[in-house]
Amino acid sequence: MELRQLRYFLKAAETLNFSEASKELFITQSTLSQQIRQLERELGVSLFQRNSHEVLLTENGEHLLPYARKTIIDADTCVESMNDLKEMIGGTLNIGVTYTFSPLLTDSLLEFMKSYPKVKLNIYYKPMTELMDMLQQREVDFVLAFKPTRRYEHIESHVLFNNRLNVVVNESHPLAGHKSVSLSELERYDIALPTLGLQARNTFDDICSNTDHEYNVRIELNDVSILLKLIRETSYVTVLAETTIHDEEKLIGIPLDGVNDNMEGCVHLLKNAYVKNSAREFYRLLSESNSIKKYSALADLI
């Protein structure tokens, strides 16, 4: 049994599509099928049930899946650990960041790049669900995002700060001078919201789910930068995490009144996976940054 075969099996099990799995592995479909058949022959069992319409894991395949995943993680951990010991701080650091977190990273990124010029940084800005999938597939080393409402079995979350929702308007808007805004007051204004799936929208929808408020939602956007530009230039109102407008000019954030809107900003890691020295150092710089300290007392990191 080879690690390569287990990697192929794992990707095929995750996608349940040999064509898609082979593309993601950068091999031909025939190579993937051949290696899976060889693994099946060695184990003496069938791992997949195939027909013209679908691919399914057999009972044996389901049983092998957690062992294969742990073996691959352990093997990657060994390699990463040895590289870290050899190079100390070096190599590549892959970071997944949600749009809400991005305003908080600038100072830490600049400091890290100055202190560790040998580390190549790859930053991925995507919705949280996509980033969590990337983390589980080890395409990123960690994810910076709010704590998800659903549980991820193979991911652990460490709270970095607490955050609240804000009603966001431009500085000339009638609400700009308010100390807080109630849900009922929002009914008076045209609203632009982040799309479903973004954490601020999920939290806002959860708050409103047990109320009878009706809002005039004129537009939904999955691009936060465009959403903020729209708020600057119109009388629209939006609802976002307060960190989203960190250092943003001509925008005012106003707390929602009388709602439970606490959102925990977290560092998300793959359970039992090796944490690179470069990742630990990035955590330290981030935790000590003024951007993070502004929003809450820090929780202990790894």
Image: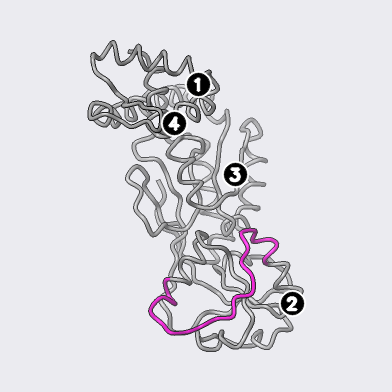
Q: Nearer the viewer, residue 270 or 105?
A: 270
- Taking 265 as reference, is 25 above or below it? above
Q: Secondary structure at mark 4?
A: loop
Q: CA distance from mark 2 to mark 1?
A: 55 Å
The structure residue drawn at horizontal position 35% and vertical position 40%, both measured from the top left corner, is: 271
Q: Quadrant of the C terminus?
A: top left
Local crowd at mark 2 within 10 Å, few (<14), some, or many (≥20)?
Answer: few
Q: Residue extending furthest front?
A: 52
Q: Is residue 245 above or below residue 127?
A: below
Q: Position of residue 138 (x, y in %)?
A: 46, 35
230 part of magenta stretch: no
Q: Which mark is residue 247?
A: none
Q: Nearer the viewer, mark 3 or mark 1?
A: 3
Of labels 3 and 1, earlier in sequence is 1
What amino acid type is highlighted by mark number 4?
Answer: Asn
Identify residue for label 1: 86
Mark 2–mark 3 Cα distance, whole angstroms, equals 30 Å
**Residue that appears at 49% across and 20% down:** 29
Q: Are marks 4 and 3 in contact (CB under 8 Å)?
A: no
Q: Nearer the viewer, mark 2 or mark 1?
A: 2
Q: Is residue 224 magenta?
A: yes
Horizontal and vertical percent for residue 3? Answer: 38, 17
- Label 2 is placed on what type of residue? Thr
User: Which comes before the other along the chain, label 2 or label 1?
Assistant: 1
